Amino acid sequence: MERETLEVDVLVVGAGPAGLAFAIQMARDCQEKGLEKAILVLDKAEELGHHTLSGAVMDPRGILEMFPHAETDGFPIDTKVSDDAMWWFSKAKKRVFKGALCPPPFRNQGKWIISASSMVKWMAEKAEAVGVEVYPGFAAAEILYGDKGEVVGVRTVDQGVSKSGEKKSNFQPGYDIKAELTVFAEGTRGSCTKQLIRDKKLDENSNPQIWSVGVKEIWKIKKDMAGQVYHTGGWPLGNKAYGGGWIYGLPDNRLSIGFVTAMDHGDASFDYHAKMQEWKTHPAMRELLEGGELVKYGAKTIPEGGLHSMPRCWGDGFMIVGDSAGVMNTQRLKGLHLSIKSGALAAQTAAEAFVTGAVSAAELSRFDQKFEQSWAYQELYKIRNFRQAFQKSFTWGFLRGGLDMLLGGRLPGKLGLQSDHERYTKCGDKIAEERPTFDGKLTFDKLTDVYFSGSIHEEDQPCHLVVPDPDLCVNRCTAEYGNPCQHFCPAAVYEWDPGEGEKAASLMINASNCVHCKTCDIADPYQNIEWLVPEGGGPVYSGM
Ligand code: SF4
């Protein structure tokens, strides 16, 4: 097949906070060093920010380092945190921990409440202002390797292919975009990044990465809570899983609420969406949301493994930044500032490599030194064993986490981790435990929530959720795990039909509902689901 080839100097895959921070810093450093480099940023979303989802209370350190005047330069701050507390839920009651009693990671006074999606649009304008080309609507489908195994670019997804794989009248082959340096900033569980980590064994010296699933809703409520920030713990998770909720007050009587659950709980019938709905039925949540209405919905996975789960982030012709690299502070539930910093540090490394004339692994490996000397590393170093301790037991997690906090991370050692998908308890085909019912006012079923995500895909295209071995679903998964995909997907993509009489059991995949959270790619117990980029579409997370 004839494909058009586009050549640039630097290609960034993903226009999120890390990718755009990289592009901006790269353009600035090139200008300073007298280098002329064509920098291109691709994003799979049809409009910038449409696939970017976060809470978000942002630590402004990263963005202020790059843009000291961001506040007066139109940076989209919804409001600043004026009041914060930790709410501890039992089934019917809440205890409030404020001031000195609020755990330090959840003290957020003065931090910025933002929409990450709006931030990305602002950063993209800044990138274009320094000469970076930003192309939304171009999804990288595969990595292009050179003769020596170096990364030489990516191939974008073919457009206009039917469900059965035939070329339609609007067929357009994907482009080969070649670059001296390709930067993977695809966000959480990027599909190319996953391929790269596997191909190059970039995680051979790391703990496995683990993730959580964050399910978010924006509500319009009756009262003004702008600036109020609360994190919740306890019910409905108790000590069954690591996680909790957030409540962030936005201007115009809007409220960002979300529930995050770590994926290493081991329960094959766990439903992240249903758990978030159940959380909203707590009396304290009911009181907040009473008389309000749902405005937006979204879900995404969040890397939680920390410093010890980061892969090698460089190699011949490539770098990895942001959520794709796993820079996330799980204890604070914050990663945007770290993503921005990792992008900026990678750009400084790359610009120096270009001065020497080669973006080789040897030159790009200097990233490690830069990272280790940065505040981002120091922040992650202090909590490097935090999530591992919680995977062992909650008691150990609180003890070790508390000690680490007191001693500033000085406790020695590197604790190991088990992958999320290896932790399921075999449950046979037991019926999932009782779930909350959805009343359509406070709680919503998955399909209603998908409507509020704005997600849409062309129906007549190859399914972007590939199950390489469908027999495994019928012959083993049903008996061993009860087909967890029907529970863990927060968008009702997977429907399990147990069959009856002559009718065989089968898995139905409603791919057009997909909100690109990547849960299935991570959570399948046999790793039998591959999330590939669709030809377009996906959620519309503007304002999220
Ligand atoms: Fe998330 Fe996978 Fe469901 Fe899509 S199909 S919404 S990526 S779990």
Image (cartoon, rainbow, N blue to C red):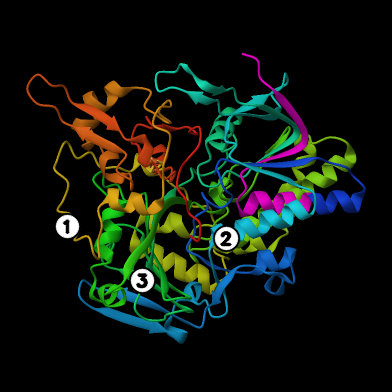
From the image, tell me which residue sits under label 1: 437
Residue at position x 27%, y 78% in the image: 287
Question: Disc 1 or disc 3, which is closer to the eye?
Answer: 1
- SS class, disc 3: strand
Q: Is residue 351 left or right of residue 110?
A: right
Q: Is residue 134 left or right of residue 520?
A: right
Residue at position x 54%, y 44% in the image: 45
How far from the left and from the top, in percent, is residue 312?
A: 63, 41
Label 2: few (<14), some (14–19) or many (≥20) C-alpha neighbours in 10 Å: many
Earlier residue among tags 3 and 2:
2
Label placed on residue 367: none
Q: Mark 3 and mark 2: span between their CA atoms?
A: 26 Å
Badge 3 vs badge 2, beta-carbon distance below 8 Å? no
Identify the image quadrant of residue 176: top right
Badge 2 vs badge 1, beta-carbon distance below 8 Å? no
How far from the left and from the top, in percent, is residue 430?
A: 14, 41
Earlier residue among tags 1 and 3:
3
Q: Mark 1 and mark 3: span between their CA atoms?
A: 22 Å
Image position of 489 with respect to 336: above or below: above
Instruction: State whether residue 335 appears in this view.
Output: no
Query: Which quadrant contains ligand 1?
Result: top left
From the image, tell me which residue sits under label 3: 232
Label 1: few (<14), some (14–19) or many (≥20) C-alpha neighbours in 10 Å: few
Q: Nearer the viewer, residue 199 or 51?
A: 51
**The residue positioned farthest toward the bottom in the image shown:** 99
Q: Is residue 24 magenta?
A: yes
Identify the image quadrant of residue 206: top right
Residue at position x 61%, y 56% in the image: 120
Label placed on residue 118: 2
How far from the left and from the top, in percent, is residue 107?
A: 50, 77
